[in-house]
Amino acid sequence: MDKELSYGDDYHYLPITSIKSGVGQEVTSDLFCLTIQIVNVIFIGQPNSDNWILVDAGMPKSADTIIAASEERFGPKSKPKAIILTHGHFDHVGAIVELIDHWGVPVYAHELELPYLTGKQNYPDPDPTVEGGLIAKMSPLFPNEAIHLGHHVTKLPSDYTIPSMSEWRWIHTSGHTPGHISLFRERDRLLIAGDAFVTVKQEYLYDVISQKPEISGPPRYLTTDWQAALESVRSLEALKPLIAITGHGLPFAGEILTHSLKQLADEFDRKAVPRYGKYVN
Ligand SMILES: [Zn+2]
Ligand SMILES: [Zn+2]
């Protein structure tokens, strides 16, 4: 492996999972969502086509699972045109080094996320004191050191396009992290929200294990700018998505999505912002 391709020193497997781990769901004919332990990775592209991309890169040590799922969907030895990262948290880049090594494809992220992906800056420490359940308490175990992708990662095009996917646009949805992005396709109002909002209460172990569906703000223990997080949820709500796939939890669609996303935007202070924690002022 080349030298500029490695994880931080605190990288490790996390034995935390959910009943949906390993379960894949075809959300539209050209979008497949695979749950790895507690996080979703998304394959965009028609089955058996060679024009597809991967959104996010799963939990630590999940590269074999992601590659197997991609070969099942797109054919043996198939590889994506690119990997797009919604952000660089450990549960969204857990297999990125092995995937780059295996596929040799470019990775794209927002410019403001690049310091965390190129060894320049660590993420702030997760906050175990934040209001929330057991996962928040466990969060000091989560890797937060910058990873090293060197020249393998580049900033997303500044015209909001997604390389190789002409129908898709990226939207800057900061708050959870500075360079967090979501992806949107106007044609069917399909939203990939990343962790800008999620569809399971990510702080609560029981909810995560059972994947109890509920629209919730960004995972609290890692969110550092709540004002920006609110503005991001408002901008996603204004898009009036018909289907939303988030970083954690099940896809949401239709009336329940419209209603609960509006409620989250309207009552963000009460529903999303923790009452206490070190990143709340
Ligand atoms: Zn995150
Ligand atoms: Zn996440």
Image: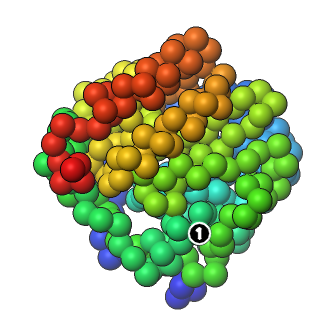
The relative height of residue 196 versus residue 77 in the rendered view (above or below) is above
Instruction: Work out whether residue 214 or residue 232 is closer to the camera in this orientation and state it.
Output: 232
Task: Give coordinates of residue 96: x percent, y percent.
Answer: 54, 64
Number of numbered tags placed on the structure image: 1
Q: Quadrant of residue 98?
A: bottom right
Whether residue 150 sits left or right of residue 46 in the image: it is left
Q: Nearer the viewer, residue 42 or 167?
A: 167
197 or 232: nearer the eye?
Answer: 232
Q: Is residue 98 visible?
A: no
**Residue type beneath disc 1:** Glu
Counting from the top left corner in percent of width and height, residue 164 is at 82, 55
Return the residue at label 1: 111
Which residue: 53% across, 72% down?
114
Assign a secondary structure to mark 1. helix
Residue at 49%, 24% in the rendered image: 261
Which percent across, then down, holds residue 266?
A: 42, 25
Label 1, ligand 1: CB separation under 8 Å? no
User: How many other residues sit within 10 Å of disc 1, few (<14), some (14-19) or many (≥20)?
Assistant: some
Rendered image coloring scheme: rainbow
Quadrant for the N terminus, please. bottom right
Q: Which residue occupies 40% across, 73% down? A: 146
